[in-house]
Image: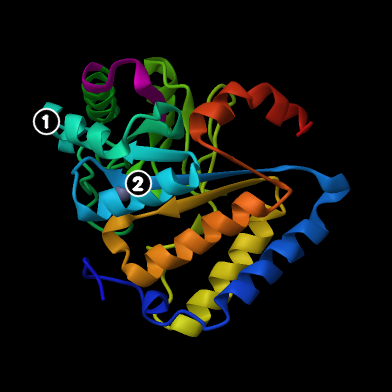
């Protein structure tokens, strides 16, 4: 059963012993952690801007667990009425949410190859203009709750975009772990390394194998960013996320945060003292 189309095979075939598998995954990560080091875990929900049933279900889950969520908003999709509705759905506890920027219009401008909104096919000035339009719109609609952190659509952008981000006053960047080009030193990066809903595997068993391995390896890294797409979730995906949030809450090594908290604590992160 689903309220969405375009659901990955693994969400049509959740292992019956998933709770046990997840438990083992956390134990493996804990065994690799040195000196009982704490792990920052953040969830980043992409393609936000249009309120609806899927968004409400996702937010409700984080509210019920009281776990922070980073929301990556496509500026061109957001209007004042939509923003009011998103806020109503999110409820009163504003400390749970961190509102950031996801591209400008979420459009691909590359004629061939990988999709990019901020890629080599356009002039630097055009990309800078789009970044600024997005920044201004979110700043105007959201006011002080807007955190100027940038996630490029499809998790990638070119060097000119990174340079422009610095000049426009962005405070952070979030792409996929290990993606090129590297972020400038002045722009802290908080990458996602676990993808729950837009994976490549067309085989469910392989999808689960890779997903759990990804989760275990990245939890052992000290920083684990988990990417969500509510448009690609069904009830099974929602159920797994519920279980994952529950397990992570009870995992003694994990500290569940959003991007705003990571930015605040960046000094400590760089020292590696947490
Ligand atoms: Zn996106």
Residue 116 can be seen, yes or no: no
- The residue under the point 36% across, 31% down is 99
Q: Nearer the viewer, residue 25 or 96?
A: 96
Q: Is residue 272 above or below residue 54?
A: above
The disc, 1 or 2, on the residue closer to the chain's N-terminal end is: 2
Q: Nearer the viewer, residue 233 or 87?
A: 87
Residue 9 can be seen, yes or no: yes
- The residue under the point 58% across, 30% down is 262
Quadrant position of residue 197: bottom left
Mark 1 highlights which residue? 81
What numbered label is drawn on residue 41? Answer: none
Q: Is residue 105 above or below residue 247?
A: above
- The residue under the point 79% across, 31% down is 273
- The residue under the point 31% across, 59% down is 113
Q: How are the colours assigned in the image? A: rainbow
Can you tell me whether the CB of the residue at mark 1 lies under 8 Å from the nearest atom of ligand 1?
no
Residue 101: image x %, image y %? 33, 32
Question: Start and end of the magenta stretch?
Answer: 140-149
CA gap between label 1 and label 2 equals 18 Å
Is 15 left, or right, of 137 in this rendering?
A: right
Mark 2 highlights which residue? 59
């Amino acid at each position: 059963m689903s309220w969405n189309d375009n659901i990955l095979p693994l969400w049509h075939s959740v292992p019956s012993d998933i709770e046990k598998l997840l438990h083992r995954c956390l134990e493996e990560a804990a065994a690799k952690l040195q000196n009982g080091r704490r792990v920052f875990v953040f969830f980043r929900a992409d393609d936000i801007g249009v309120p609806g049933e899927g968004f409400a279900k996702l937010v409700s889950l984080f509210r019920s667990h009281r776990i922070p969520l980073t929301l990556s908003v496509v500026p061109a999709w957001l209007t004042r009425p939509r923003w009011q509705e998103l806020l109503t759905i999110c409820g009163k506890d504003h400390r749970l949410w961190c509102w950031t920027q996801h591209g400008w219009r979420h459009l691909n401008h590359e004629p061939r190859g990988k999709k990019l909104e901020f890629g080599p096919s356009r002039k630097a000035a055009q990309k800078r203009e789009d970044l600024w339009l997005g920044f201004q719109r979110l700043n105007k609609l959201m006011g002080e709750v807007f955190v100027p952190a940038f996630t490029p659509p499809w998790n990638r952008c070119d060097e000119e975009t990174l340079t422009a981000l610095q000049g426009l006053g962005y405070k952070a960047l979030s792409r996929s772990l290990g993606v090129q080009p590297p972020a400038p030193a002045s722009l802290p990066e908080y990458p996602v390394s676990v993808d729950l809903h837009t994976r490549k595997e067309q085989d469910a068993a392989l999808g689960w194998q890779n997903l759990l391995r990804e989760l275990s390896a990245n939890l052992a890294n000290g920083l684990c960013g988990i990417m969500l797409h509510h448009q690609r979730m069904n009830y099974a995906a929602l159920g797994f996320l519920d279980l994952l949030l529950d397990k992570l809450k009870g995992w003694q090594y994990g500290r569940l945060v959003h991007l705003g908290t990571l930015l605040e604590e960046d000094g400590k992160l760089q020292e590696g003292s947490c």
